[in-house]
Amino acid sequence: MKILSPKSDLIKNISKKILDNYVNVSIIDASDEIEVQNDKTIFISQNLESAQVVDLLIRKRCSHLLQMNESHFLEDLERTAALLENPKEYFSSQGQCLLKSARKSHMIEFSNPSDKERLKNECSDFVIKAKGALIAESLDAIVEELYMNAAFDAPRLRQNEKNHPYIDGCKAKIVLMLSDYHLLVSCYDPYGTLDMMKFVERMNEVYKKGAGNVLNMKKGAGAGIGCTVLFEHSTNFFLGVIPGQATVVTCLLRTGISAKHRAQLKKSLHLIRI
Amino acid sequence: MPSCEIKINKTGTQFKIQIIGTIDEDTNFSAYPLTGATQLEINLGGVKSINSTGIREWVNWIGAAGGAAIVYTNCPKIIIDQINMVRGFLPKGGKVLSFYVPYYSEELKSEKHVLFTFGQEYDQTGLKTVPSVKDDKGNPMEMDVIESKYFKFLK
């Protein structure tokens, strides 16, 4: 990795073994004012709250903001670097490449509102043995929003076009994976209509103005706060789009810890493009 | 297909409402108008989940209650999270008479949800007495919330 902030205390302690890999990836301390041209750059921070993560991602025009927590940082760093070196794998695996240490996984297909109850029941059954507090509640909240995005928002954005994947028999998918320390929830839809910058800017608006003040009250459209619900329930949050082809949204949560501890972990945000 | 059951019991202008299930895009609050109510008591103990569309529908519905005196009871954590996050989820002047607080045991990795009641564990000034909770093996459990955030609505 190319180190763009050689004096950074955050980066100094990263092992040489990791830094010697991923030669096409750069790493920079997010507090550094150097202008970065290379879009294969990981910005590192450690004490940012959710709203600050989103704000900084927009201001710095970066795609990967990774925060250090007391454990799993090196694993997070390698995961992010691997994503930058091979973003196609994120889409071809529908997010599964993010948790190679998973010991259990499950995939559920869906394409219309009548699938929702089955989808939620299968998710609930999957997570029943996951250790840690309030995992089921977080999973439920995440699945609700991922389902809404894939089942309603994605198709609505292509309503004037002839090609409708769900009508043509394609399905959206939710993937669940469990490792010793993480739960991964990933949703793929075959529309590829998500505008990632609009999504992030909407998150920024919700955080700056308050959810109650920016609720979209128009019937037939989303309420516009699901983006922050997803982020708040995640430790690491990934958005990836191949326009017109695929959207993959992934939430990675720490398990085996209290809900309070999980809420105190600093969040990371990643935008994946090919 | 609605995944939420709404039961209303009216005594004059006093409405007692119970919500059970998931509040989401299929929840039709318009079938339960609140016009005419001067007192609303809403029992949320049966709410399993609420999505962002459900939050919007709720804010619309409860906002139409006008000047009614509104109280929520038996609020699960997912409802308290919305009260804290979404202005209008609990209308101005509304009160929470009881709500659940999650506790966690590091030893057993188990959870309990403890009901806090107005006048006992808290009052209009904030938390009063925090109950001591033990897991099934007698180990002390800790409140599993960031207190400054979870109890924000009490202020």
Image: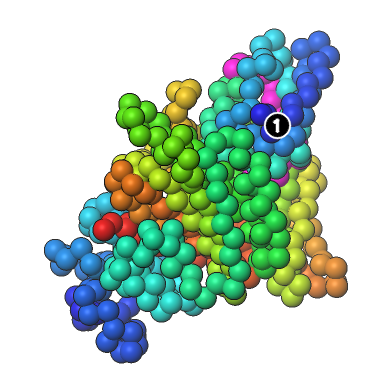
Across and down, in percent, residue A179 comes to 57, 72
Q: Is residue B152 above or below residue B104?
A: above
Across and down, in percent, residue B28 comes to 63, 23
Of B127 and A147, which appears nearest the observer?
A147
Q: Residue pushed farthest bottom?
A: A16
Q: Is residue B17 above or below residue A182?
A: above
Side of A3 relative to B145 (left or right): left
Q: Amino acid at mark 1?
A: Cys
Across and down, in percent, residue B65 comes to 63, 18
Q: Which image quarter is the C terminus of chain A in?
A: bottom left
- Res. B83 image quadrant: top right
**Residue at x-position 57% and y-position 39%:** B51
Question: Quick check: can you spot residue A151?
Answer: yes
**Residue at x-position 77% and y-position 12%:** B13
Tag 1 residue: B4
> In this figure, what is the number of numbered marks?
1
Side of B101 relative to A157 (left or right): right
Question: Quick check: can you spot residue A53?
Answer: no
Q: How is the image coloured?
A: rainbow
Q: Which image quarter is the N terminus of chain A in?
A: bottom left
Q: Is residue A262 above or below residue B127?
A: below
Q: Secondary structure at mark 1?
A: strand
Magenta span: B64-79
- Res. A102 image quadrant: bottom right
